[in-house]
Every structure is written in C-alpha cells, then in structure tokens.
Image: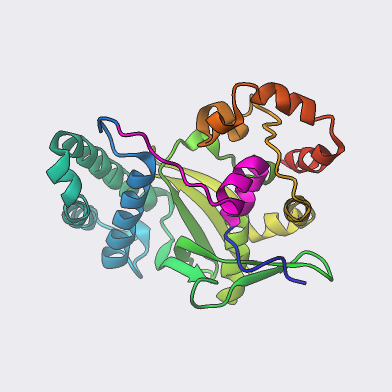
Amino acid sequence: ARFGSAISPTRFETYARCPFEYFLTYVLGIEEVEAPSEEFQLPAMERGSLVHDLLRRVYEERLTGHALGRLSDDEVEASAARGAQILDELGRVHAENHPATWTAERERTMDQLKALLMHERDLHAESVPAFFEYEFGISEPAAFVFELSRDVAVAFRGRIDRVDALPDGAIRVVDYKTGSPGRYKKNRFAGGTQLQLPIYLLAATELMETSDGSALYLMVSGPKDVPQFGTDELRARMGEFRRALRLIVEGIAAGDFFPLPASTSDAQYGCEKYCRYRNVCGAARRNLAEMKQTDPDAARLAELRAIE
C-alpha cells in the first residue's frame, strides 16, 4: 500500500521537528499571517526565493556545461555582472517601494554571489552544472517511490535546486540554503529533520540511472558546504534512514500530532525561537511537553529523535 499521494520531504521533516506544527500546517492548512512592520530587510522567505531565482538564472545562463574549476577571473566577473542585471530585474518592486532597504539588500546579495562563485571554483572544481530546479513527481518524471516494507511504500515529489555532473559519471545534488549554517549538521539525519537531501539523492540517482552520487547543502551565507552523504555512506546507514521514515509514517497514520519539543536546548527543535505557531501552544508549552514525554504515544517520537 502507498502512504497517501506524493509528498515533499519537508513535510516529513516538519513532523520530526514538531507533530503539532505538522498538524496545523498540513492537516488544518493554517497559514501564518505576518504582522505589518517597517521593512528594514527582506523577510527571510522572500529573500530565500529571490536568491534561489538569482542563482538558477546565473548558473543556467552562464555556467551550464562548464567545469566550475576552469572559470577564469573574467568569466567569474561576467557571471557576476549578469547576476547584477538579473537581480535588478527580480528586485524592481522592492527598489520602488523600499529603495534604502533594497540598496542594502542588493549589495549584500551581490557580495554573496561573487563569494559563492569563487567558493565553487575552488572547492567544486570538477563539478559541471547540468540541471536546475530538477522536478520529480510534480509534473514529469514520476514520483520517487521508496519501499519501506513489503506492504508500505512512500511516494516523494520534489524540486532539486541543482544537479552537477562529475567526470567519473557520478552526480552531485546541491541544495541552496540562505539561512543560518549552524542549523544543518554534516552527514546526519538529525532525528528526522534532515531527510530532504538523502531522499533527493536517492531520487536523482534512480531517475538519472546512476549508482554513484553525493549531496550537499550549499550555504549562501559564508559561503560554506555542509555535505549530506554520498551513496556509499547512505547505503551504510540505510537501516536508520528506513527506520526514521517508518516512525514518521506510523506517527502520522496514528494521528500523533501533540506538541512535543522534546529537546528545547537543541537548535533543530528550538520552538521558542523558530516556530511560527509558538503562540498557539501558549506559555505552558514546555510544561505540557515534559508531561507528554511520559505518555506511551510519545515513545515513537523519542525513538525518532535518537537517530543521529
């Protein structure tokens, strides 16, 4: 049996972070309403979307099919110059409505683009950008189906920021992140909160018919690489990966949607700081979470969060 329709890996990560957040977002369909405020910088989600669009267009137009390590200084400058044109196009509305804010954001973004191009030239010399916003399960190709057991399968859909080709026939899945680099840990499932790239890597290698690949978060701020498994490392930890998916599927199927920030000291479960719905839980959320941890229903989530 298939577990529902094709879903995005981020849904599973949301459940692992907090079942109640999953319930509010994906079961009730509640959307966050941003309070109006003076705009001194772009909202994080809006900035993330803008940077993703900028990088896709620069790399697609200027760097497709070119080994990043062979870029000359002139080619880097030309790519950055094209990036400036694209950024002005993408930010036209911001420039009109908030000129001072946009001037600062534009300078910051251009500095990051130039630093990122140099970073990739130095550290990803053999990478050849090949595919951008590679979709599966959204239109074509079909969803990636992962067999959890003989009886249960999960279908995933997604959009991979970039897939690079390597000289030995392997691929590299690249996912851009514009937030804080401290949130993501190298080669970890992080209690189910870092499942996106392992799923993307499995999907990409299957759909592109290759057995060798790797994946990384590319932190735009820095810039910095956070590697997330090669195919060999992922195969070695397939038991843990399968168990993490199974625990999430079982929790969702059982309707275990209680708020449970099991480790409020850990940044990945930092509901006090990051959760959109912390006011819904109320001031007693910590006490309620402590009480819930003795409930048998919470054992499944405790087991999930023990997976490194």
User: Which corner quadrant of the image does residue 150 belong to?
Assistant: bottom right
The boundaries of the magenta stretch are 9-36
Quadrant in the picture for the C terminus: top right
From the image, give the main secondary structure of the stretch colored magenta: helix
Along the viewing direction, whichever of 68 and 37 lies nearer the viewer = 37
x, y percent for residue 69: 36, 57
Residue at image x 38%, y 51%?
A: 120
Residue at image x 45%, y 64%?
A: 164
x, y percent for residue 286: 67, 23
Q: Is residue 187 visible?
A: no
Residue at image x 34%, y 67%?
A: 66
12 lies left or right of 274: right
Find out whether residue 11 is within the magenta segment.
yes
User: Which corner quadrant of the image does residue 272 belong to?
Assistant: top right
x, y percent for residue 225: 48, 45
Find out whether residue 65 is within the magenta segment.
no
Quadrant in the picture for the N terminus: bottom right
